[in-house]
Image (cartoon, helix red, strand yellow):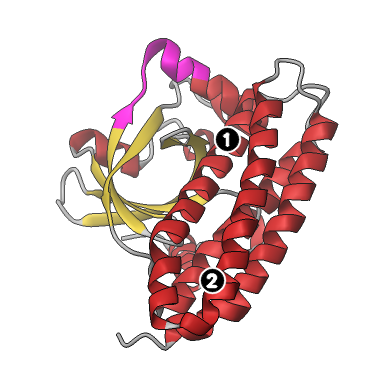
Amino acid sequence: MPNDFNQQIIDEFRANGGRVGGYFQDARLILLTTTGARTGRPHTTPVAYLPDTDRIVVIASAAGSPRHPAWFHNLVANPTVTVENGVVTYQAEATVLTGAERDEVFARAVEADPGWADYQAKTDRQIPVVALRQVSGGPPRASSLGAALRLIHDAFRRELALVRAEAARSGPRLGAQLRINCLALCANLEFHHTAEDGGMFPAIGERHPELRPVLDRLAAEHLAIAALVEELRALLAADDADPSRLARDVDRLTAELDRHLTYEEERLIPALDAVPG
């Protein structure tokens, strides 16, 4: 059973599409459900994560406790876990990283947030680092198609805000984790717009021919946003990338994307919510 503090976070997370307030307001959180190593029962815990290309990474710090957290023991015994990210729930395979790979990922985490080093300094155990790779999943957790679209859009807005804040407080060079955070955002945005162009937009156009001019505008905006994303990727590929340039580019992308998402919501959510369940 989760403790009362964790349960409050779990309830808030599920009620607000992955957003929580207080201490964890600006953290990237997931809900990680493992199978109890001794009980066999599901055990859900809020856990901070780091983007890592086609996977995410969690760190079993337990705030520097001398013992590994229970969820770590559970996933060692049963590596199949459930991840909730506020938009979708999916099954993942957990891999405990070792050797140079573990050290490289932990070093990235420390560079991005020295708090991880503080936790390591409090304990004699080597804090484990675990990769979670999605193996199956489901649709967005929402009451309607329109609500699902807004949930996805809000996740992009939140991630952009986090990246903007990270870029603003970056030092004279771009950290490795910040680069990965940006690249993961770019990949997710590209995937989302490709799915809309190839699936959702044609389906809406068939059902609502009067919206085809709107869909044409949205598709054109996808191309403009894709050009901004490519500029951002080119900047991130440079060894001497300037953090101030990154902040400006992220600001440009944020402004353009927010206008796009707001227009899309205003014009398409009524049509999506009119689709019979």
Q: Is residue 42 left or right of residue 58?
A: left
Q: Badge 1 local density, few (<14 within 10 Å), some, or many (20+)? A: many
Q: Which residue is drawn at 51% across and 25% down?
A: 123
Image x and y of residue 204, in percent: 43, 75
Image x and y of residue 256, in percent: 73, 56
81 over 183 or under it: above or below: below
Image x and y of residue 15, in percent: 48, 73
177 over 151 or under it: above or below: above
Which one is in front, 143 or 56? 143
Q: Residue at x 45, y 83 (%)?
A: 208
| Mark 2 residue element | helix
Q: In this view, does 164 lie to the left or right of 42?
A: right
| Mark 1 residue element | helix
Q: Mark 1 points at which residue?
A: 183
255 over 243 or under it: above or below: below
Asked if the stretch drawn in magenta spans residue 229, the answer is no
Magenta-tinted stretch: 95-104
